[in-house]
Amino acid sequence: MKKVVTFGEIMLRLSTPGYARVVQSTHFDATYGGGEANVAVSLAQFGVPAAHVTRFPDNELGKAATNLLKKWGVETGAIVFGGERIGIYFLETGASVRPSKVIYDRAHSAFADLQPEMIDWNSVLDGAGWFHWTGISPAISAGAAACCKAAIEAARQKGITVSADINYRKNLWQWGKSVQEVMPDLIAGCDLIVAGKGDAKDILGIRGNGANDEEQEISVAQQIMQRFPNIKKIVNTSRGSLSASHNTLSGSLFDGESMLRTKTYDINPIVDRIGGGDAFIAGVIYGMLAYRNNQKALDFGVAASVLKHTILEDANLATVDEVEAVLAGNTSGKLVR
């Protein structure tokens, strides 16, 4: 398989111990994570060559985050060093009726101060077959948005498949331009996107027509493809939240003709749901590369996401065999010897 390159910010993650609240915590558990890097780590566990591109401060925190990527088999040679600080997020894990909570501290991070001339995308993307980004990066700053655009343009010129999770984070878009001004131009360069009805409405002004959720979902996907003819596949997950500790999860894929769906999984208890969406798209990418079958790729993506909910920290550390075991119905959690 050719290399998959991902691009995005990695932050220092500070989690309250157990289920403690931030206001009562006297210490935090530290690790590193970021949506796009989570995809690279997951793909590396599946045996796919993966590289991540970001910018870190040239200090011990930046080196520690780089070393974590190396530990999980992700190439780090294209990482840029400079800037003043690493972005931080605080995680308070919820339980029962109390939801989990995230507090961001990422203003003026090394990644936020990134400029397009700092990365030679033609060189970075040499030998790559796939490039993945998310809607988080262009939301952070004008420089990060420009870098994202340069990467997409370079990937298109090289014939590299481009995917994006276009997730919309309203509070991040503070640098001057709106999401509606920036994202459509970036989405136009994609072959595959992760998008739901909410993202389509908030980012693209697209609303679904139909008598029920399924008809509306198909309508939204059709309108997106009509507007962006490069897009060949749209995937998404559907989450049911019974509590912070108990969710259901299923997935869908629209290929321009039909809407494919997966079974619905019951996830109880949830160990850590951060990174569940990243695990999903990583699984879909792997499935597209390994199986070249839309239904198998979708099924693999959802099963990978389900497994991630059982794994602490940001990244999915499940193997292909473990995901395929879930697909085969081995979900009892029986001790493996």
Image: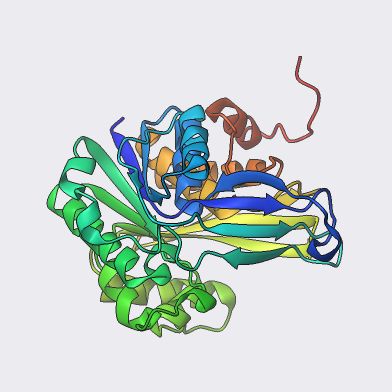
Note whether 202 is above or below 243 in the view shown.
Answer: below
What is the x, y in percent for residue 11? 53, 53
- Foreground residue among 89 and 300: 89
Q: Hey, which residue is sitting farthest top in the picture?
A: 337
Q: Residue at x 34, y 83 (%)?
A: 177
- Foreground residue among 190 and 177: 177
Name which quarter of the figure residue 108 lies in: bottom left
What is the x, y in percent for residue 49? 36, 31
Q: Is residue 96 visible?
A: yes
Q: Residue at x 26, y 66 (%)?
A: 146
How was the colour assigned to the protein in this rendering? rainbow
The quarter in which the N terminus is drawn is top left
What is the x, y in percent for residue 80? 32, 46
In the image, taking residue 221 as reference, residue 283 lies left or right, namely right
Q: Is residue 125 visible?
A: no
The quarter in which the C terminus is drawn is top right
Q: Residue at x 45, y 84 (%)?
A: 207
Q: Residue at x 49, y 51 (%)?
A: 10
Name which quarter of the figure residue 247 lies in: bottom right
Note whether 3 is above or below 106 in the view shown.
Answer: above
Tell me how many marks there are.
0
What is the x, y in percent for residue 70? 46, 30
In the image, taking residue 248 as reference, residue 69 lies left or right, namely left
- Foreground residue among 304 and 316: 316
- Foreground residue among 98 and 266: 98
